[in-house]
Amino acid sequence: MNKSQEKVLVATLCGLVVTAAAGFAVQPAIAAGYHVDQLARVSNVARWDTLNVRKWPASYSQKVGEFRSGTPVWVERCIEVAGGADWCLVERQDTRGWVNSRFLTPMEDWDI
């Protein structure tokens, strides 16, 4: 193995270590959330727009789906983000992911 290959190998290993450490750092924040286990309705979304569902609780995270205003969703849990918006893990049919909590209104009447 020459010096160039060693440098690439070391850089790759460092990248893997940093990625793994970041993954473990995110887990406690998600685990610290509060359980909701309640039905909610998507709200505060313009009639012509949709609410993006994200893979992780961040606006820059990968989009995994979308809901129209008025769509009922099951809210599993929410997390409090210091200095930012709260995010909730929601599910409806085959779509499961995180949405900003300001776009959810709890439903008292479960008859959908």
Image: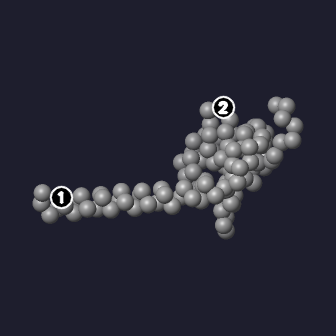
x and y percentages locating residue 7 in the rendered image: 22, 63
Q: Nearer the viewer, residue 68 or 104?
A: 104
x and y percentages locating residue 33 in the rendered image: 66, 55
Residue 52, label in figure: none
x and y percentages locating residue 51 in the rendered image: 68, 45
Q: Residues within 10 Å of mark 1 (few under 14, many from 20)?
A: few
Is residue 83 something that shows in the picture?
yes
Residue at the bottom extreme of this rendering: 83
Is residue 48 something that shows in the picture?
no
Colouring used for the render: one colour
Q: Residues within 10 Å of mark 2 (few under 14, many from 20)?
A: few
Q: In the rendered image, which quarter is residue 76 located in?
A: top right
For image coordinates 61% across by 54% down, the residue present is 31
Q: Earlier in the sequence, mark 1 or mark 2?
A: 1
Amino acid type, callout 1: Gln
Residue at the left extreme of this rendering: 2
Residue 93, label in figure: 2
Residue beneath disc 1: 5
Q: Nearer the viewer, residue 43 or 80?
A: 80
The relative height of residue 104 versus residue 28 in the rendered view (above or below) is above
Q: Nearer the viewer, residue 34 or 102?
A: 34
Q: Where does the C terminus fall, quadrant-wise?
A: top right
